[in-house]
Image (tube, rainbow, N blue to C red):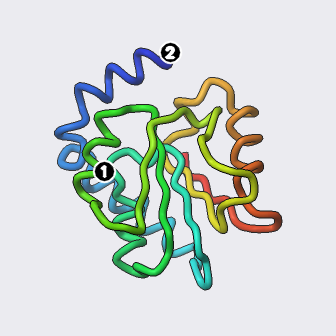
Amino acid sequence: MNTNEVIRQYDRLARKYDTVWKKYNTATIDETLARVDVGNSKTIFDVGCGTGNLIDRLNNLNGNIHYYGCDINKEMISIAKSNLATNNVRFAVSTAESLPYSDDMFDIVFSTSVLHFVREREKMMNEIRRVLKPNDTFVAWL
């Protein structure tokens, strides 16, 4: 599936995404959080954040962290923004291959259920490496 097809598919799915995929998303987030200690993190980034479910859960655990999320789909980001209208959460529409953030900005980068959509995975990994602070944590789930 090409990028434009993915965007169109998720444009149609966006409003019902959280209902349709609730069980899967909850299980994925549970497994992710069971394996990662956010500890003293100050900045956390979710690449392909969709409607912001992972960030919402993390923010409920620790509201003192600055959270960032991006997704290629503007409808998903619109929902994420309306679900998490707090001062410590920021969202952007962008591809995983061209992230709109500074070098060495994040303590932890997450990417769940995204890699199978990314055409240029090497570019994505280079971008994640660029925005992640040296020797910090990247967590990916297919």
**In the displayed image of the protein, which residue is found farthest to the bottom?**
40
Vertical comparison of 128 with 76: above or below: below
Which residue is found at the position 36% from the left and 69% from the top?
57
Vertical comparison of 13 with 103: above or below: above
Which residue carries the number 2 mark?
2
Work out how far the residue at label 1 is from the one at label 2, CA to CA, in angstroms.
Answer: 24 Å
Considering the numbered disc 2 on the image, is that residue within a helix, a strand or a loop? Answer: loop
Vertical comparison of 95 with 37: above or below: above
Q: Is residue 115 left or right of residue 86?
A: right
Of badges 1 and 2, the one in the foreground is 1
Which residue carries the number 1 mark?
80
Using the rendered view, name the quadrant where residue 120 is placed. top right
Which residue is found at the position 30% from the left and 51% from the top?
81
Which residue is found at the position 39% from the left and 80% from the top?
61
Locate residue 88, reporting x and y percent.
42, 68
**Numbered label tally:** 2
Amino acid of disc 1: Ala
Considering the numbered disc 1 on the image, is that residue within a helix, a strand or a loop? Answer: helix
Q: Is residue 103 left or right of residue 42?
A: right
Using a 10 Å C-alpha cutoff, classify the residue at mark 1 as few (fewer than 14 neighbours), some (14 to 19) or many (20 or more). Answer: many
Locate residue 7, reporting x and y percent.
38, 23
Tell me whether the residue at label 1 lies in contact with that at label 2, contact meaning CB atoms closer than 8 angstroms: no
Which residue is found at the position 60% from the left and 53% from the top?
140
Amino acid of disc 2: Asn
